[in-house]
Image: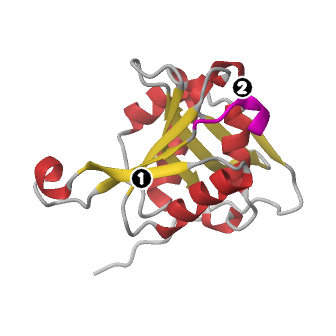
C-alpha cells in the first residue's frame, strides 16, 4: 500500500493584510477546498459553491491574505424574509483562526448595501459545533443584540437519524446603528 503525498497548503504571511471582498464565480473551487478543510462543515458540490460565489455574491464574503483564500461566509436573504440574513456557512482556515476574522467578515457583510434592511441574522448550528456557537454569541454580545435558539431541523424527522439536530440561532432585532 502506497501512502499518498499530502497536498501542500499555501501559508499566508501573518503580516499581510486580509482583504475582504465579494466573491466571484472563479472562487467557487477555492471555496470548496476551504470548506473541505474546515471540519465539521458539510461539503457542498463545487457547482453549489460557484452559485454561492455568483448568484449570492452580495451576501457572501471572501477573505484573502497574500492572494490565498483564508475565509469565507456564505449567506443569503430568504425570499419571504427580506429583513433576515441567513448565514449558511462560516469557514476560516486553521492557520488564520483566533484573529476574529469570522466576526470581521460578518461585520463587512452587514455593512453592504445589499444588507441595509437586515434586522435579523439566522444560522443553523449543530449542538457540538462549539466554535460556531462561540463566534455568533460573541458577535451578538459585541453588538448588544438579543438571541434566541430552537431546533429547526430535527435529527429523526429531517435526517432519518443520520445527522444531528440543526439548531436555529436568531440574532436580533437590531438596526444598522448597532453595527
Q: Quadrant of residue 92?
A: bottom right
Q: Residue at x 48, y 41 (%)?
A: 122
The mark closer to the camera, 2 or 1, is: 1
Which of the pair 65/91 is nearer the observer? Answer: 91
Which of the pair 101/166 is nearer the observer? Answer: 166
Q: Position of residue 31 (x, y in %)?
A: 53, 43
Q: Residue at x 68, y 21 (%)?
A: 116
Q: Is residue 179 visible?
A: no
Q: Residue at x 73, y 37 (%)?
A: 108
Report crowding for label 1: few under 14, some 14 to 19, many 20 or more residues within 10 A (C-alpha). some
| Residue 8: mark | none
Q: Position of residue 98 (x, y in %)?
A: 71, 68
Residue farthest to the right, as pictured: 15
Residue at the disc numbered 1: 149
Residue at the disc numbered 2: 112
Q: Residue at x 69, y 44 (%)?
A: 105
Where 140 sits versus 121, above or below?
Answer: below
Q: Is residue 70 visible?
A: yes
Marks 2/1: CA–CA distance: 26 Å
Tell me the quarter of the image containing the C terminus.
Answer: top right
Magenta part of the chain: 173-178
Q: Quadrant of residue 95?
A: bottom right
Tell me if residue 45 is in the magenta stretch: no
Q: Position of residue 145 (x, y in %)?
A: 64, 47
Which of the pair 2/165 is nearer the observer? Answer: 165
Secondary structure at badge 1 equals: strand
Lower position in the chain sequence, tag 2 or tag 1: 2
Amino acid at each position: 500500500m502506497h501512502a499518498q503525498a499530502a497536498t501542500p497548503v499555501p501559508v499566508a504571511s501573518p503580516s499581510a493584510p486580509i482583504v475582504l471582498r465579494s466573491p466571484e464565480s472563479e472562487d467557487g473551487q477555492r471555496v470548496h477546498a476551504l470548506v473541505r478543510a474546515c471540519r465539521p462543515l458539510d461539503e457542498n458540490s463545487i457547482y453549489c459553491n460557484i452559485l454561492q460565489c455568483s448568484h449570492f455574491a452580495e451576501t457572501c464574503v471572501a477573505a484573502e491574505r497574500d492572494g490565498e483564500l483564508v475565509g469565507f461566509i456564505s449567506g443569503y436573504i430568504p425570499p419571504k424574509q427580506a429583513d433576515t440574513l441567513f448565514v449558511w456557512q462560516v469557514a476560516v482556515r486553521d492557520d488564520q483562526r483566533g484573529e476574529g476574522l469570522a466576526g470581521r467578515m460578518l461585520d463587512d457583510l452587514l455593512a453592504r448595501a445589499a444588507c441595509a434592511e437586515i434586522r435579523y441574522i439566522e444560522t443553523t448550528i449543530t449542538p457540538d459545533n462549539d466554535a460556531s456557537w462561540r463566534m455568533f454569541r460573541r458577535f451578538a454580545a459585541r453588538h448588544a443584540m438579543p438571541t434566541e435558539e430552537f431546533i429547526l431541523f430535527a435529527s429523526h424527522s429531517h435526517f432519518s437519524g443520520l445527522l444531528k439536530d440543526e439548531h436555529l440561532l436568531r440574532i436580533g432585532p437590531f438596526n444598522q446603528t448597532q453595527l
